[in-house]
Image: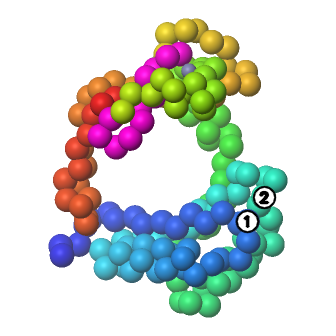
Amino acid sequence: MVPIMGYIGRFAPSPTGPLHFGSLVAALASYLDAKANNGKWLVRIEDIDETRCDPIFTTDILRTLQAFGLQWDGEVEIQSKRKNLYDVALQNLRANRSIYACVCSRKEIADSALFGLEGPVYPGTCCHAGNAEAGNAIRVRTSNACISFMDHVQGRIEQRIQS
Ligand SMILES: [Zn+2]
């Protein structure tokens, strides 16, 4: 395999408990992939769910990674400390009219979903409804343009996300 220039791998555990074996295997796989490509391996702590996450587990997870020789590059990113960046990104999406508020319940979406190649597809019911954002789900306005990328294992992946 030819190494990829500028390769960046990452591991993003949620600190809801100690690192379990499956997550350790995932961390090892992404670490080895990054190193095989002469890339960087980053760690981002997904602590957005404040009711389930505990900083004690962040410390525990990082110690476990180090105990197995999985040393990350750079600083560990802590998601909860990056909320201002998400607010800015959301403001930009809002300014570009790239998002909209959706008032559909999960049941309504399940009942009205279109069935695409990969499963149910939200039909865009609220796309032009002009719903208020407060208290509602925020969705990204999409097009049916073809999106493609090269996956190491699966090869070229190509999909139109509205079908
Ligand atoms: Zn909706």
Amino acid found under the numbered disc labelled 1: Thr
Looking at the image, do the residues carrying marks 1 and 2 touch, with CB atoms under 8 Å apart? Answer: yes
Q: Position of residue 44 (x, y in %)?
A: 59, 62
Element type where label 1 sits in the image:
loop
Residue 52 got which mark? 2
- Considering only vertical position in the picture, is 9 above or below 21? above
Q: Is residue 162 left or right of residue 70?
A: left
Q: Position of residue 147 (x, y in %)?
A: 27, 38
Residue 16 got which mark? 1
Q: Is residue 147 visible?
A: no
Separation of residues labelled 1 and 2 (CA atoms): 6 Å
Residue 52, image quadrant: bottom right
Tell me which image quadrant ligand 1 sits in. Answer: top right
Q: Quadrant of the N terminus?
A: bottom left
Q: Position of residue 150 (x, y in %)?
A: 23, 55
User: Which of marks 2 and 1 precedes in the sequence?
Assistant: 1
Q: Residue at x 74, y 25 (%)?
A: 135
Crowdedness of circle 2 by 10 Å Cα count: few (<14), some, many (20+)?
few
Q: Position of residue 125 (x, y in %)?
A: 49, 16
Q: Is residue 25 left or right of residue 4?
A: right
